[in-house]
Image: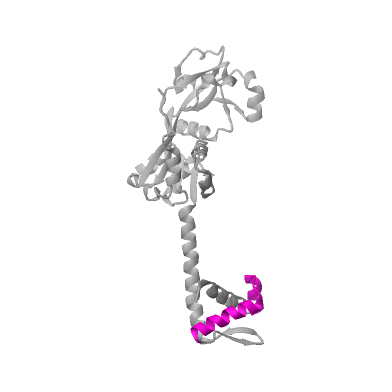
Amino acid sequence: MNTDQLIKFLTIVKQRSMSKAASVLYVTPSALSHSIQSLEEELGTTLFIRNKKGIILTASGEILYKYASKIDELSTEALNAVKNTSLITISSNHPSATFVLSRIPDECFERVSLIHHDGKEMPELLLKGIADAVVCDDYYIKQAFASGVLNASDVSRMVVYKETLGLFVPEGHELYNRSRITYTEIKDMPLCIQMNRLSLREWLSNIEMASGVSFNIKFTLDEYSYTNFRNKIPLPELREVNSLFDPKVDPTLKNYKFVRVNDFYSNRFIYMWYQKSKEEKLRIVLDSITGYYIPSN
């Protein structure tokens, strides 16, 4: 008796017809009948009684059906368990997660999925195992540690890169000759921002809630507006820069100077957070970002 025979047996019971079961299994009725006859011979008993209404299980058939159903359920459970172990889900509120993907070997890429979520969802995604790892800063994660939602001893992290908040100030603006600035100095100043930078907008919202400062965003520019009208808007652009980006070498920013914001939560590290119990499952991802972050001088 083998698994193939049990699957055929269960299909016949479900369809209550040899011909219908053969159609579902993509085999001929004669081949299916032969397989069941071999099973009956091996067991030394008859499993079905055929009548005008179809197929009825014998007492021996009822016993086999009970155990065959359990075997089928266990097989499905085992298959799902193996799939869940091999498939890796990463959630992120930050575009740096794409850098995590960039170094994963091509042959392993299909095992990984990347889903965007808001930062406030990250602790629950980790806790419930909905995500195997999350890519974000520590704003909500530390809150989850403090409230007891997450146990800090169960969670590890690996740095992806560092970000600094600042202004791209157009030449001739009053802030052009500054090198650093605080929130208080710009709280009433009209600013612009790129609307596609969702992680930045969430970061600014968290700063406003924690510090009590409100930014005066005068223009929210979509990609088209940014490309065509940015030089016509004489306002500083509030933006983050990461540890791998040097604004001085970007030709599109030659008429702008980056003025760093030096205040509460104006620097942040982006981490990949994960439950320690999933470290081996995440090995290909962890290996791909080891050494990715290079501290700036």
Closer to us: 229 or 71? 71
Say which quarter of the image contains residue 237: top right
Residue 50 vertical position relative to residue 206 in the rendered view, above or below: below
User: Residue 63 placed where, x, y %?
Assistant: 48, 82
Is 218 on the left or on the right of 269, as rendered?
right
| Residue 34 is one of the magenta-drawn residues | yes
Query: In what quadrant of the picture does the C terminus appear?
Result: top left
Is 134 on the left or on the right of 110, as rendered?
left
Closer to us: 143 or 15? 15
| Residue 185 is one of the magenta-drawn residues | no
Residue at the spot x=56%, y=77% of the render?
9
User: Residue 217 placed where, x, y %?
Assistant: 56, 26
User: Residue 70 placed where, x, y %?
Assistant: 47, 73
Is 255 on the left or on the right of 276, as rendered?
right
User: Residue 146 placed where, x, y %?
Assistant: 35, 42
Closer to us: 168 or 144? 168
Residue at the spot x=61%, y=80% of the render?
33
Closer to us: 206 or 55? 55
Residue 219 vertical position relative to residue 68 in the rendered view, above or below: above
Residue 200 vertical position relative to residue 5 in the rendered view, above or below: above
Residue at the spot x=44%, y=21% of the render?
182
Which region of the structure is painted magenta? 18-44
Residue at the spot x=40%, y=39% of the render?
158
Q: Is residue 46 visible?
A: yes
